[in-house]
Amino acid sequence: MQESGENYLETILLLKERNGSVRSIDIANELGYAKPSVSRAVGILKKDGLIVVDSGGLIELTEAGQQKADSIYERHRMISEYLVQTLHIDEVTAEADACRIEHVISGETFDKIKAYVEKYRKMFQIDS
């Protein structure tokens, strides 16, 4: 999956958690994209079986879409936390960098970052 598709899935996940429901216009507003661009992306995600859109325009993640979105968001959170904890990057910069890194990082590197963050949390008794 391309980075843009991953960004859409992550955005749908976060909007659903924040607002309870998601429509194309919400995605467009959140990402600052034009409505036709969002419509194209929604169509691709729908065709790929990652989302469903009901007759009222509400967007829901399918099971496969939910799993993919959760995985992307986990990478984002772990990378951001790693950058803050180990490199003492400010949170705003860490969030922005994590958003870019999450799409290109190898599984091996991510697994090491995740293990480090989990060990750090346990060592300092930090809840996730």
Image: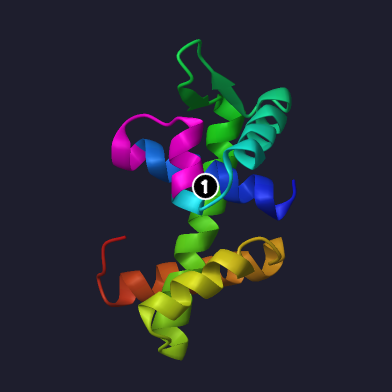
Q: Is residue 36 above or below residue 6?
A: above
Task: Give left or right: position of 128 versus 102.
Answer: left
Residue name at image x 51 percent, y 61 percent = 76
Q: Is residue 77 above or below residue 119?
A: above
Residue name at image x 63 percent, y 48 percent = 6
Q: Position of residue 43 (x, y in %)?
A: 68, 28
Instruction: Pick whichever, 29 or 89, lies toward us.
Output: 29
Identify the main secondary structure in magenta: helix
Instruction: Pick whichever, 30 or 120, lies toward us.
Output: 30
Task: Give left or right: position of 126 versus 73.
Answer: left
What residue is disc 1 on? 10
Q: Position of residue 118 (x, y in %)?
A: 42, 67
Report the residue that reaches farthest toward the bottom: 87
Q: Is residue 115 visible?
A: no
Q: Position of residue 51 (x, y in %)?
A: 58, 26
Color encoding of the figure: rainbow
Dot 1 falls on a residue whose secondary structure is helix
Q: To which quarter of the image does residue 110 belong?
A: bottom right
Task: Give left or right: position of 100 versus 94.
Answer: right
Q: Residues within 10 Å of mark 1 (few under 14, many from 20)?
A: many
Identity, as a three-letter code, of the amino acid under mark 1: Glu
Is residue 82 in the magenta section? Answer: no
Residue name at image x 39 percent, y 82 percent = 85
Start and end of the magenta stretch?
17-29
